[in-house]
């Protein structure tokens, strides 16, 4: 009986899979046309390794490919420039078989030598094309590599210093996409504005602070894109950008004012695409400083703040409540978490237990301007201050300029301060290890949280490659840190992209990068 | 014959003019030096570490140290300044911290956009402002005069940002007559030579591009002109009124000249001298207005370059842009001073 059921399931899956792929292959995409995407700010560099900026990454993912890539709309990995790969049992060696016959936009061949060149120019200060201080992501994304070698023309081998399970995810990031070595040699220091990759679109022109133009790569290994031309244009003012979308002069935009959401929804020519983003906004409570060295006090802080009200009203519905450190859409999220619902009574009780029945006073640091994980800037601090005062806690707000704020935040000069995080590679390690590994005190562990068991679990999860096992470990870490409450977990921002209804097949990616390979325009 | 003794011979006049211009140009040097010191001190003393801003949340302390060394920010301030100055004297403004482009290229691309906008806007403001001012003065206390002066008051009082948005809503969205963002149609095909798109389209004989550029200029130019047009109208009105009461106007009328000649030849020429000063000074405020106008209308000009520079603490860009703007402003003032002598023969340069 069981076997037959399994068989039936299998058949269903196969049929579904077939129709799925048939649909994907036969969808009535129309070729041609120019799509214009309006951004709020210009790119800073178009070399994949020389930027951390989202506006740059959006261009880069369309011009370049990585060895692997994210499946459409997910953080799962699928083949790209590598067709398949093998990971050694000790998790130290990654051998990739490369796709044959792929060419860079300048006509030079893509092969193992090109991969080795492009990795080494970021990591090796002795490399002739290494540019001091130019690779902000290299440490994070490739720093664990001990050696990268070309085994033969289409096989490349990475040897890691330590087992590091999120490595594959790193290779799908925009920052590790492969650039043409010949272009690097030709342009030298100016490679940042002359991107040459293997991607679906070729770079045409960059008019500073105005527009970046790309054209279809007719020979793209994964099929020519539907669009003939793709333009990224900068319109700094949110109102102007929306007017241009309504007028039909642009097709897609970022940066919608919360007050304009209804206006977009009511317009029949527009559609609002929404998806939860991979990010979190939180308050780091300095776990080594009084009174936040006391777990009861930290929990009380979490119960005292009405997060639902904050995301619904202050943030205009652009965010969801955070129950823990991970956004719910990430692989490895523990959906059994209860989090800390608004409960001022409980907060008062916990304070009583901790010996702070009369409340206490502390300095709450904030930055001023909105950030991508906090659309209201310093007003968030004022709201939190109000909630805390209702349970007898007096927060004195201190506002600092951003550069100083971050520097002192890393150094731990705050008692409590607002921070946030945006995922790099879609792996839970990129949140949990960043926030809670005691080794990261002084950089990204802004709560100065130390828990030996958490450290051990995080390290173990980095070293094993079995996904199911890793998932168990990360769920355990979430249970522990939510109970320890080193943060006040606040909110996850949604991604909101208004598009014209003539834009078809546009998919939001959790990393929030904009991919246009499969997008087409109804004409 | 009695007036000739006071007149200066033509050749001497020209020589005087040249030495005057030369002296004014030489004066530029200490002025720019002073500006460079002030700008340099200002950007280094206000809070905000460009290195931390560049690295953002994710950089480590070592990254910051390395970058600081790379950019030379680990040196004492006076050494940094002299380095900057010696580079400046060699025409090297450094590279943008934000995007690594040479600052001189950044300015070279952005400045023409602002100049095109400023000049067109100035032409609008002068033509309309002077015409309105003269009509108001001639028809003093009439309905037209009152309406013009209320309009001028409104023009001065309305925020540039708001004017821009209103024009966009009406002429861009409702009526759909004019484009509202960018310098030229995004699909236009223009070979850029000088970065002055109007000039480039003429040079390449690309009339579609010329038309597109011009249309893209209209709304921002009107927006930018609202304050100057009001100031020019008010100034023209008051100086015209003053001139109208002069004896020589009564004489001109008495000798039977047609009113048109009196106004155009006698009144206008004398009334315009202070107006030219105002126009020259307005160029300065134009650059200020350009920051807002360029943001609203998404024009990649020097105003936006400066704002992006300030927000990102991009020191080389701020320094370069301010020095460039200051030089330009001084240069405009020099031209205004020279123009005086044409408008008013009583003014001599010695």
Image: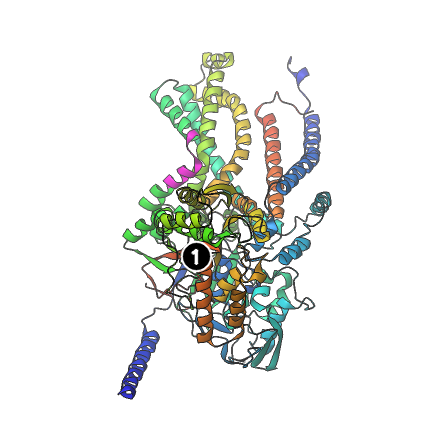
Element carrying mark 1: loop
> Could you tell me residue A314's position as x and y percent?
37, 46
- The residue to which callout 1 is attached is B187
Main SS, magenta residues:
helix
Q: Image check: A339 left or right of B348?
A: left
> Could you tell me residue B162's position as x and y percent?
40, 38
Local crowd size for mark 1, using a 10 Å CA cut-off: few (<14), some (14–19), many (≥20): few
Is A28 included in the stretch rendered in magenta?
Answer: no
Q: Nearer the viewer, residue B336 or B261?
A: B336
Is B163 included in the stretch rendered in magenta?
Answer: yes
- The span shown in magenta is B157-167
Q: Is residue A366 visible?
A: no
For the point 37% across and 22% down, which residue is it? B146
User: With respect to residue A54, does B239 lie above or below?
Assistant: above
User: With respect to residue A11, does A381 lie above or below?
Assistant: above
For the point 55% across and 54% down, which residue is it? B56
> Could you tell me residue B200's position as x and y percent?
52, 50
Image quadrant where one finds the C terminus of chain A: bottom left
User: With respect to residue B332, does B246 lie above or below?
Assistant: above
Task: Determine the image quadrant of residue B143.
Answer: top left
Task: Determine the image quadrant of residue B153.
Answer: top left
């Amino acid at each position: 009986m069981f076997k037959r059921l399994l068989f039936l399931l299998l058949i269903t899956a196969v049929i579904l899979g077939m129709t799925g792929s048939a649909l994907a292959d036969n969808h009535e995409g129309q070729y041609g046309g120019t799509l214009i995407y309006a951004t709020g700010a210009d790119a800073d560099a178009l070399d994949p390794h020389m930027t951390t900026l989202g506006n740059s990454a959006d261009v880069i993912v369309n011009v370049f490919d990585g060895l692997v890539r994210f499946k459409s709309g997910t953080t799962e990995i699928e083949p790209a420039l590598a067709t398949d790969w093998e990971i050694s049992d000790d998790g130290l060696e990654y051998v990739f078989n490369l796709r044959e016959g792929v060419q860079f936009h300048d006509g030079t061949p893509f092969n193992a030598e090109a991969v080795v060149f492009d990795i080494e120019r970021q990591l090796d200060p002795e490399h002739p094309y290494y540019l001091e201080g130019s690779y902000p992501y290299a440490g994070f994304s490739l720093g664990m590599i001990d050696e990268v070698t070309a085994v033969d023309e289409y096989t490349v081998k990475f040897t890691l210093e330590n087992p590091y399970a999120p490595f594959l995810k790193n290779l799908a990031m925009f920052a590790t996409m492969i650039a043409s070595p010949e272009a690097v040699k030709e342009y030298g220091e100016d490679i940042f504005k002359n991107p040459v990759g293997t991607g679906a679109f070729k770079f045409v022109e960059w008019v500073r602070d105005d527009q970046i133009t790309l054209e279809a790569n007719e020979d793209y290994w994964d099929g020519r894109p539907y669009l003939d031309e793709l333009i990224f244009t900068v319109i700094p003012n949110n109102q102007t950008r929306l007017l241009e979308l309504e007028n039909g002069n642009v097709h897609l935009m970022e940066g919608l004012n919360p007050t304009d959401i209804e206006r977009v929804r009511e317009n029949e020519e527009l559609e609002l695409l929404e998806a939860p983003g991979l990010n979190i906004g939180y308050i780091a409570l300095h776990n080594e400083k009084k009174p936040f060295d006391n777990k009861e006090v930290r929990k009380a802080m979490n119960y005292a703040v009405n997060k639902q009200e904050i995301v619904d009203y202050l943030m205009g519905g652009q965010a969801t409540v955070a129950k823990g450190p991970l956004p719910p859409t990430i692989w490895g999220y523990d959906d059994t978490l209860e989090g800390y619902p608004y409960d001022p009574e409980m907060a008062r009780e916990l304070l009583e237990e901790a010996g702070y029945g009369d409340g206490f006073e502390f300095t709450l640091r904030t930055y001023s301007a909105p950030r991508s994980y906090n659309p209201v800037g310093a007003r968030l601090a004022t709201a939190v201050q109000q909630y805390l005062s209702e349970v007898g806690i007096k927060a004195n707000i201190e506002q600092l300029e951003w550069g100083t704020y971050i520097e002192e935040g890393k150094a731990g000069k705050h008692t409590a301060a607002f921070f946030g995080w945006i995922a790099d590679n879609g792996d839970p390690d990129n949140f949990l290890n960043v926030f809670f590994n005691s080794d990261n005190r002084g950089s990204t562990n802004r709560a100065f949280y130390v828990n030996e068991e958490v450290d051990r679990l995080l390290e173990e999860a980095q070293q094993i490659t079995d996904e199911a096992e890793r998932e168990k470990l990360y769920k355990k870490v979430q249970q522990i840190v939510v109970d320890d409450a080193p943060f006040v977990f606040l909110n996850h921002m949604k991604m909101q992209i208004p598009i014209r209804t003539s834009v078809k097949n546009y998919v939001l990616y959790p990393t929030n990068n904009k991919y246009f390979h499969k997008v087409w325009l109804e004409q | 014959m009695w007036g000739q003794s006071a007149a200066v011979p033509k050749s001497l006049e020209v020589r005087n003019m040249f030495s005057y211009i030369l002296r004014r140009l030489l004066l530029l040097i200490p002025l720019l030096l002073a500006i460079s010191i002030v700008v340099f001190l200002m950007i280094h003393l206000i809070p905000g570490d460009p290195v931390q801003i560049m690295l953002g949340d994710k950089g480590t302390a070592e990254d910051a140290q390395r970058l600081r060394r790379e950019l030379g920010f680990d040196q004492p301030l006076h050494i940094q300044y002299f380095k900057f100055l010696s580079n400046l004297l060699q025409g090297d403004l450094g590279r943008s911290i934000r995007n690594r482009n040479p600052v001189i290229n950044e300015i070279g691309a952005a400045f023409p956009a602002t100049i095109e906008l400023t000049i067109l806007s100035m032409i609008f403001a002068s033509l309309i402002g002077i015409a309105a001012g003269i009509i108001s003065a001639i028809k003093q206390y009439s309905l037209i005069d009152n309406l013009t002066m209320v309009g001028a008051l409104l023009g001065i009082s309305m925020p540039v940002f708001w004017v821009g948005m209103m024009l966009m809503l009406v002429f861009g969205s409702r009526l759909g007559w004019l484009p509202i963002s960018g310098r030229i149609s995004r699909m236009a095909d223009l070979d850029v030579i000088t970065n002055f798109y109007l000039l480039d389209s003429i040079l390449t004989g690309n009339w579609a591009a010329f038309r597109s550029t011009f249309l893209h200029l209209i709304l921002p130019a009107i927006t930018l002109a609202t304050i100057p047009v009001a100031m020019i109208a008010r100034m023209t009105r008051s100086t015209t009124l003053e001139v109208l009461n002069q004896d020589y106007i009564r004489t001109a009328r008495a000798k039977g000249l047609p009113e048109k000649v009196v106004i155009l030849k006698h009144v206008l020429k004398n009334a315009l001298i202070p107006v030219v000063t105002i126009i020259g000074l307005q160029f300065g405020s134009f650059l200020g207005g350009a920051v807002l106008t360029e943001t609203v209308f998404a024009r990649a000009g020097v105003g936006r370059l400066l704002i992006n520079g300030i927000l990102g603490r991009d020191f080389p860009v701020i320094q370069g842009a301010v020095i460039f703007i200051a030089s330009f402003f001084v240069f405009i003032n020099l031209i205004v001073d020279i123009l005086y002598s044409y408008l008013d023969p009583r003014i001599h340069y010695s």
